[in-house]
Amino acid sequence: MSAPNNYSELQDVIRSRYGELSKRLQQVAAYVLDNTNSVAFDTVAIIAERADVPPSTLIRFANAFGYSGFNDMKQVFRRHLVEETANYTDRVRLFRELEDQAAPERPEEILNEFARANAQALQQLAAQTSAEDLNKAVLALAEAENIYVIGLRRSFSVATYLTYALRHLNRRAFLIDGLGGMFKEQLELIGPKDVVVAISFSPYAQETLVLTETAAGVGAKQIAITDSQVSPLASFSDICFVVKEAQVDAFRSQSASLCLVQTLAVSLAFHDDSGKGGKKKRANARF
């Protein structure tokens, strides 16, 4: 089996397979689920002692979930701990504590690292995104009565840009932001002729998951932009785009996600233009 690449996936697979594990491996499972900080920070010897198992059992546990060793699995816990730290100053401090190698610190070094990582992410996006999915997504947006877009936390800027671009194409596009605590009221507007674009990356925003379930319940078509084929958004989507964003140290970029939504918007502009012969509409679509 392939190893889960984020903490949320690992949690789910450990819980789903807990009953089939041996007694020793169940001890490890219970410990790693209840002691995230210990798994991220402590040595294998200390974790084994606290879980009351031999160190070799930790290695067997990691192997059972597709990892080459326990230290390989520890990286999932470390990344999760860093991502859950909202304050960027604290995130940098925590990253330094967790990582052995020196990280770029000077502005020009950081710029070079982000530029390199983003170039790779954009190449991967272009190579791995299906032309069929792109065409299906553009057609769905073109035929939608209303388009509802949601992206919270780090996905908010991507969702906001897409809504802005769709409005410049004279689409009835609405950003689901829960302003004033009105998530429920905004969700109740979605109908079967609408399209929902849901954008979320691990750790996934709960409100986004609720929206995808609601949209599925009323029969709305769904376009998901997320980071894994096993993302909870993928199970409800009609079209799922998996975007692997660039990451430098503890910070993930948004360049690939923005590139994808801009591609959808510009493609929709060309679709409108070819369908109606209206160069004026495309000329006014400044985004």
Image (cartoon, rainbow, N blue to C red):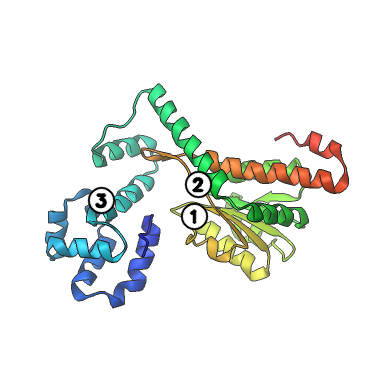
x then y, percent, for residue 103: 31, 32
Disc 2 crowd rating (10 Å Cα; few below 14, some 14-19, many 20+) is few
Kindly indicate whether the residue at mark 1 contacts the one at mark 2 (C-beta within 8 angstroms): yes
Type of the residue with mark 2: Arg
Label 3 packing within 10 angstroms: few (<14), some (14-19), many (20+): many
x and y percentages locating residue 243 in the rendered image: 52, 49
Which residue is under mark 3? 40
Query: From the viewer's perspective, is 185 left or right of 73?
Result: right
Q: Name the residue under label 1.
A: 205
State the SS at label 3. helix
Spatial CA distance of label 2 from label 3 is 24 Å
Q: Distance between the residues labelled 1 and 3?
A: 23 Å
Q: In the image, 157: left or right of 45?
A: right
In the picture, the quarter occupied by the C terminus is top right
Above or below 37: residue 254? above
Labels in figure, total: 3
Nearer the observer: mark 2 or 3; the answer is 3
Percent position of residue 213, x then y: 58, 66
Q: What residue type is labelled 3?
A: Ala
Place of residue 285 in the rendered image (x, y in percent of width and height, measured from the top left): 76, 37
Residue underneath mark 2: 153
Instruction: Say whether disc 1 or disc 3 marks the residue closer to the N-terminus.
Output: 3
